[in-house]
Amino acid sequence: MVTRAELMLEVWETSFWSSSKTIDVHLGWLRRKLHDDPSAPELIKTVRGVGLRFEAGAVGPRYGEQPPWP
């Protein structure tokens, strides 16, 4: 589990919030690259009021039996 504040600090090295949409936009790009449907994400899940969770073991019909990365 990663909070949005932790992401801002670790990725952009700042605690300044120009816009919470910054994370949303980058998250959308990442989900598209991973072929993770934003309307029903399996790999990167948003936990409302808490942050984001990466489901490392997620598999589904889009990925067959293996995740899309080596």
Image (cartoon, rainbow, N blue to C red):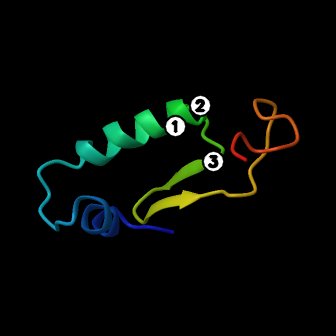
Residue type indicated by callout 3: Leu
**Residue at horizontal 31 percent and vertical 48 percent from the top:** 23
Query: Quick check: marks 1 and 3 in contact, CB under 8 Å?
Result: yes
Residue 13 in picture, x, y percent from top left: 21, 66
- Looking at the rendered image, the disc whose residue lies closer to the viewer, 2 or 1, is 1
Residue type indicated by callout 2: Asp
Callout 3: few (<14), some (14-19), or many (20+) C-alpha neighbours within 10 Å? Answer: many
- Does residue 5 lie above or below 24 as drawn? below
**Residue at horizontal 51 percent and vertical 69 percent from the top:** 1
Q: CA distance from mark 1 to mark 3?
A: 8 Å
- Residue 38 visible, this angle: no
Residue type indicated by callout 1: Arg
* Residue picked out by circle 3: 43
- Does residue 52 lie above or below 58 as drawn? below
Location of residue 67 by image quarter: top right
* Residue picked out by circle 2: 37
